[in-house]
Amino acid sequence: MNIKQLRYVTAILSTGSFSSAAACEGVSVQAVSKAMSELEGEVGDALFIRTSSGVTPTPLGEAFGARADKVLTEFDALERFVHTRPRSAGATGRFVVGFCAPEFPGVQRFCALIKTVTARALGCETDVLLTDAKTCVDELKAGRFRALITLGPVKGEGIVCGRLGTMMPMVIMAADNPLAEKAELTIEDISTRPVLLYPGYEHFNDSVCRAYASRGMTSELVEVTSPEGFAEFIHGKQGLSLAVGGEFLSAYDGCVMRPIAAKDRMPVPICLSSLSGADVSYLELSRALAKMKILF
């Protein structure tokens, strides 16, 4: 029996499936399934009943999960102590995170939400500041940030990147756009209109816009560099903007948001990156964000 198995048990109980638990913990479904089989072998009885629609805990699984949760609470407290204790007399313990994402309306509210969750998860004073893909890695290496949250992985020498979870993109359009009459949009629907690119946010463009293009979206990808250009693109040209975290964003003036149809939906990985050797544990933050239904 080990701490990973306990984490998988509590993740399965909170999400209701092995696949969702695997996404929360940043591992494969096979890893979770193997760990549960080994744990059940050690316990000597089933913890979960597996069906085609998901899993349900046995009475033993419920009781085991309640005890595992208590153990993990104590373990997480110990982990926070290790990771957030001052390293020197002048250390403040403040945890500053860079959030690399376009400045959608309401994105500061999303930053505030992440700040609150991070502070609770890590047990230290936290700031979450907006940054862009052109400067975020340099700012991380220069020490402005202890970590980066990005849409998609960050690559670079000396960078360690872990997946916090995923979010589903939505489509922003003018309220009078003919596509606004639909409850959800397919790739075929989206392909009838141009799609906006955000200059300076290549993590977003690569992980969302170009990812859908590789999936079969044939829309023209258009860079827009100003609020005025955005308004003209959305209202004048009846273009579309793909956004992540739509449920946390403010409404755009004269616009509506629509989800992407389940058959075409592509989860966008939300990643936490830090310098190699830094005392940053992404698993604890991932669990906190998942529990608050911010990430999946």
Image: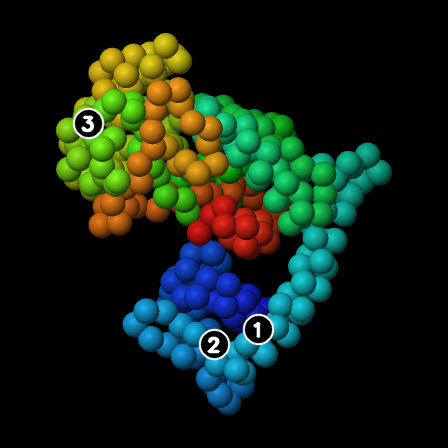
**SS type, badge 1:** helix
Q: Who comes first in sequence, dot 3 or dot 2?
A: 2
Q: Is residue 253 left or right of residue 149?
A: left
Residue plotted at (50% across, 29% down): 107
Residue 137 seen in render: no
Q: Amino acid at mark 3?
A: Pro
Query: Foreground: 182 or 159?
Result: 182
Residue plotted at (22% across, 37% down): 182
Q: Who comes first in sequence, dot 2 or dot 1?
A: 2
- Give how far apart the Cα atoms at labels 3 and 2 are: 46 Å
Query: Foreground: 1 or 278?
Result: 1
Total numbered circles = 3
Mark sitting on residue 147: none
**SS type, badge 3:** helix
Query: Foreground: 81 or 267?
Result: 267
**Residue that mark 3 sits on:** 178
Nearer the observer: mark 3 or 1; the answer is 3
Dots 2, 1 in contact, CB < 8 A: yes
Mark sitting on residue 57: 2
**SS type, badge 2:** strand
Q: Amino acid at mark 2?
A: Pro
Q: Amino acid at mark 1?
A: Gly
**Residue that mark 1 sits on:** 65
Q: Is residue 117 left or right of residue 20?
A: right
Q: Is residue 95 above or below residue 24?
A: above
Q: Residue furthest bottom?
A: 44
- Give how far apart the Cα atoms at labels 3 and 1 are: 49 Å
Q: Who comes first in sequence, dot 3 or dot 1?
A: 1
